[in-house]
Amino acid sequence: MEVHVSKRQILARVLYVLAAGFVLLFAALSAKDWHTYLAHPEWSAPYYAYVLMRGMTLLTPAFILLVIGVVFDREPKP
């Protein structure tokens, strides 16, 4: 049984993995920021500032990669 996977589908899957990596990185860095905030709240910015910054720098590209992956995953119309 031969399974045919096009280059577009492979690219879409790579983009999905990259998007998932960005989301996991966001979660890990947010946890680190939370522990930093708990350890020294008097020296730190509010936690929501960290989440807002991390969201803009990591979740926005993840969403863009996800949308591009969906576009590449669809079959081109003849």
Image (spheres, rainbow, N blue to C red):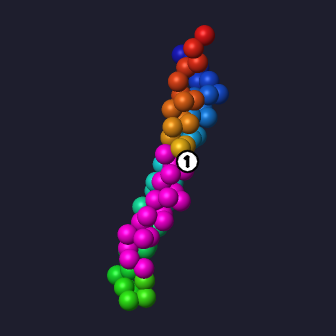
What is the quadrant of residue 30 in the picture? bottom left
28 and 44: which is toward the camera: 44
- State which region is magenta: 45-63
Residue 14 vs 71, above or below: the answer is: below
Q: Residue at x 55, y 43 (%)?
A: 65
4 and 46: which is toward the camera: 46
State the quadrant of the N terminus.
Answer: top right
Which residue in the protein does label 1 denote?
18
* Prevailing secondary structure of the magenta residues: helix
30 and 61: which is toward the camera: 61
Where in the figure is residue 4, as x and y percent of width and height? 59, 20
Residue 22 vs 12, above or below: the answer is: below
Amino acid type assigned to the residue bearing label 1 in the image: Leu
Residue 66 vs 2, above or below: the answer is: below
Q: Say whether residue 28 is visible.
A: no
What is the quadrant of residue 7 in the picture? top right
Residue situated furthest right in the rendering = 7
Where in the figure is residue 32, as x and y percent of width and height? 43, 73
Where in the figure is residue 38, as x and y percent of width and height? 34, 81
Q: Say whether residue 74 is visible.
A: yes
